[in-house]
């Protein structure tokens, strides 16, 4: 396996299906789980959902093919920390594992925008951007910029605040909305009409974010 050649990474275990993945996660308590979306007995989405509900501290990095966007969407909502395509290069894979282990959220280029626009086509019934989750106007602005794919430093520069202040805003946003990380904030923004599909600035998609 590619990861075994990296001096700072150790493969704690492997699983042939989703059920085994749950057992291994409970037994080994890994920092990061590389989870295949499609597995026998239990798929990666269900396994991710169960791990998150059980309070697993592991960060889950989904592996998928380009034509499985709908599965990735549901995996992100279930609590996955990001995803990579199965044809990712060695550097992308190892870099992705390190990033997720460090608490970052990994979004594969291009696919992120496509899946969000395909499956979040507008605000959910009875919701509005103005009242979404009791967010303040400043917090709504930060949510929009997170959905655009901007990093904390980029958001800080855009709104003329310190990066520390932006981190505090994001922490409050996560707490108010009951979300786990920035990926879920981006999905929430599309679902509730805070950001509309097709309105991202050019080049905004596919960035990797720090939590």
Image (tube, grey):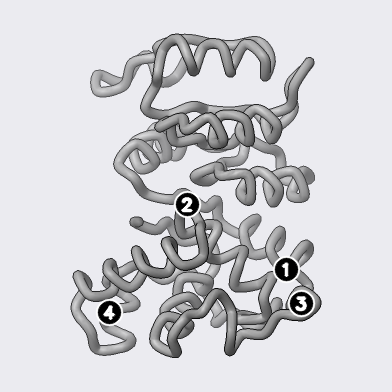
| Residue under pointer 2 | 180
Dots 4, 1 in contact, CB < 8 A: no
- Vertical arrangement, residue 104 with respect to residue 61, above or below: below
Is there a contact, CB below 8 Å, between mark 3 and mark 4? no
Q: Residues within 10 Å of mark 3 (few under 14, many from 20)?
A: some
Neighbor class of circle 1 (other Cα within 10 Å; few <14, some 14-19, many 20+) is: some
Q: Mark 3 or mark 4: name the one nearer the start of the chain.
A: 3
How busy is the neighbourhood of tag 4: few (under 14 within 10 Å), some, or many (20 plus)? some
The numbered mark at residue 122 is 3
Instruction: Work out whether mark 2 precedes mark 3 in sequence or the reverse, and give the earlier one.
Output: 3
How far is the residue under mark 2 from the one under mark 1? 21 Å
Callout 2: helix, strand or loop? loop
Residue 131 visible somewhere in the drawing: yes
Residue for badge 4: 156
Say which mark, if any, is on residue 117.
Answer: 1
Q: Residue placed at 71% from the left, 80% from the top?
A: 127
């Amino acid at each position: 396996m590619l990861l075994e050649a990296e001096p700072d990474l150790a493969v704690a275990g492997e699983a042939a299906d989703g059920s085994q993945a749950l057992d291994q996660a409970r037994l080994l308590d890994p920092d990061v789980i590389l989870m295949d979306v499609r597995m026998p007995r239990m798929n990666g989405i269900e396994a991710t959902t169960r791990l998150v509900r059980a309070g697993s501290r592991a960060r889950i990095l989904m592996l998928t093919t380009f034509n499985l966007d709908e599965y990735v969407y549901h995996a992100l909502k279930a609590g996955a920390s990001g995803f990579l395509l199965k044809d990712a290069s060695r550097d992308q894979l190892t870099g992705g594992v390190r990033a997720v282990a460090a608490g970052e959220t990994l979004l594969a280029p291009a696919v992120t925008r496509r899946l969000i626009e395909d499956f979040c086509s507008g605000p959910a019934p009875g919701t509005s951007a103005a009242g979404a989750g009791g967010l303040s106007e400043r917090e709504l602005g930060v949510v929009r910029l997170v959905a655009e794919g901007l990093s904390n430093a980029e958001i800080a520069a855009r709104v003329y605040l310190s990066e520390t202040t932006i981190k505090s805003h994001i922490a409050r946003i996560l707490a108010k909305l009951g979300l786990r990380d920035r990926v879920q904030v981006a999905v929430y923004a599309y679902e509730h009409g805070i950001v509309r599909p097709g309105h991202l600035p050019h080049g905004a998609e596919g960035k990797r974010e720090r939590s």
